Amino acid sequence: MQTNIMKKLITCLTAGLLVVGAQSLMAQSSTNSVNQPGTHTPGEHRDHLAILKLVGLTPADVKGLTREERQAKIKQAATNVVAQLQAQKASGTLTAEGQIRLDRIEKFLAHGGHNKGGTPSDN
């Protein structure tokens, strides 16, 4: 009779420790993943995609590049697009959408290529 009670007690204690341990692990993993260096918030990813689209690049165009190489490629593409749009503006063929795109890319470049004020579409 006492062995049955002891077995139940050990089973309950083991189950309780497993539950507490699992909750502790869940809490640790959720706090660690938020503050890991090198991770991006969903808004940053959206901003990055918007900038790529704005300058005519795709994520595949910058995949595998270092941060410096990626920034240089995006800046070069932005500079090329600005030159094309300014040429259209000078010839009088720039559309309203083209003017908006030109303004946004120039604003992006004016901030040193760092778009901390929101997505280009927000401005």
Image (tube, rainbow, N blue to C red):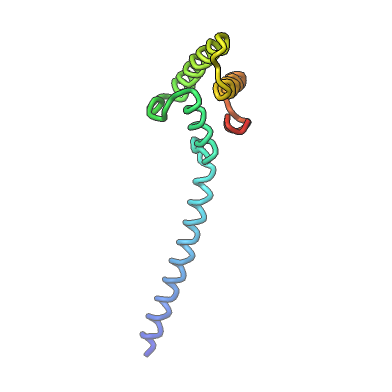
Residue in the image at 46% along x and 25% along y: 67
Position of residue 5 in the picture relative to residue 118 (left or right): left
Residue drawn where x is 55% and y is 17% of the image: 94
If the image is split into quadrants, where does the C terminus sit? top right
Identify whether 23 is placed above or below 47. below
Q: Count the marks.
A: 0
Relative to the observer, which residue lies in front, 53 or 41?
53
- Is residue 21 visible in the rendered image? The answer is yes
Residue 111 % position (x, y): 61, 22
Residue 33, percent from left and from top: 49, 46
Q: Nearer the viewer, residue 78 or 88?
A: 88
Image coordinates of residue 51 in percent, x first then y, are: 51, 28
Which residue occupies 51% across, 47% down? Answer: 32
Q: Is residue 113 visible?
A: no
The quarter of the displayed image where residue 99 is located: top right
On the image, the x and y values in percent for residue 70 come to: 45, 23
- Quarter location, residue 9: bottom left
Q: Is residue 31 above or below residue 99?
A: below
- Residue at 48% x, 14% y: name it: 80
Up the image or down, 117 lies above or below 89; here it is: below
Q: Nearer the viewer, residue 91 or 75?
A: 91
**Along the line of sight, the residue nearer the viewer: 123 or 85:** 85
The outermost residue toward the bottom is 1
Which image quadrant: the N terminus? bottom left
